Image (cartoon, rainbow, N blue to C red):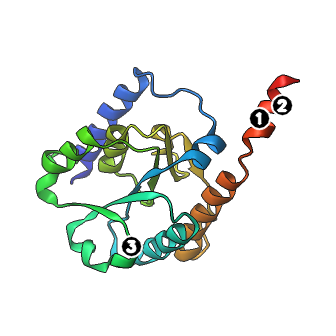
């Protein structure tokens, strides 16, 4: 997709988000702790995909009960180990329109599925990820903190830019699981009674 189309799609999405009611405040800790259905958008670059896949393995290890659906380019599907027990939603250029927005089967998937949590493992700006996360109805949408894309997400995770790629993905998985593990519903209820 050319930068002109990417910028046009980004501008359209920004207007859509600005005038929608999707920017409500949520309890991030509670949402992470109660998540059951998780959507993960995998990176398009091969060199990032391997590091993201290792982080996904760690996430599966720490959250075996989560039903995880991975959105990935069709040519990357063969790299995903069946033992991870993931649902895979592949896409190709035929599933994306000129603006980079979803169409066809990938869009129809979200008419019958909704998610609790959406994790963007892509470091760069992706119009496709943003629109799919919108269609997913996930109340909590997390990404690596980035000025260009953070507008569309409600949970940004900062990573040190000089860290190795694998460490950056590990930080996201570690942070998400540690925050979720910190949830204590009795403390919230007790605190509300005072």
- From the viewer's perspective, tell me whether residue 41 is left or right of residue 35: left
The residue carrying mark 2 is 191
Q: CA distance from mark 2 to mark 1?
A: 5 Å
Among the 4 quarters of the image, the one containing residue 113: top left
Q: Secondary structure at mark 2?
A: helix
Among the 4 quarters of the image, the one containing residue 50: bottom left
Q: CA distance from mark 1 to mark 3?
A: 38 Å
Q: Residue at x 38, y 32 (%)?
A: 14
Q: Residue at x 39, y 37 (%)?
A: 137
Mark yes or no: residue 99 visible.
Answer: no
Of tags 3 and 2, the one toward the viewer is 2
Of all residues, the one furthest to the right in this rendering is: 194
Q: Quadrant of the N terminus?
A: bottom left
Residue 124 against residue 21 in the figure, above or below:
below
User: Residue 11's x, y, as percent?
Assistant: 33, 34
Mark yes or no: residue 137 visible.
Answer: yes
User: Residue 169's x, y, as percent?
Assistant: 54, 68
Q: Say if mark 2 contacts mark 1, CB within 8 Å.
A: yes
The residue carrying mark 3 is 49
């Amino acid at each position: 997709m050319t930068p002109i189309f990417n910028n046009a799609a980004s501008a359209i999405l920004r207007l859509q988000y600005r005038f929608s009611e999707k920017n409500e405040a949520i309890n991030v800790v509670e949402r992470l702790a109660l998540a059951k259905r998780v959507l993960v958008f995998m990176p398009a670059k091969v060199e990032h995909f391997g590091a993201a896949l290792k982080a996904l393995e760690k996430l599966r290890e720490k959250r075996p009960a989560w039903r995880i659906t991975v959105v990935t380019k069709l040519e990357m599907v063969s790299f995903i180990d069946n033992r991870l027990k993931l649902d895979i939603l592949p896409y190709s250029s035929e599933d994306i329109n000129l603006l980079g927005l979803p169409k066809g089967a990938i869009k129809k998937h979200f008419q019958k599925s909704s998610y609790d949590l959406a994790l963007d493992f892509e470091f760069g700006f992706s119009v496709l990820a943003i629109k799919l996360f919108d269609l997913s109805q996930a109340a909590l949408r997390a990404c690596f903190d980035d000025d260009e894309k953070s507008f569309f997400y409600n949970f940004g995770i900062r990573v040190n830019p000089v860290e190795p790629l694998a460490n950056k993905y590990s930080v996201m998985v570690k942070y998400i699981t540690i925050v979720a593990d910190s949830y204590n519903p009795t403390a919230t209820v007790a605190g509300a009674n005072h």
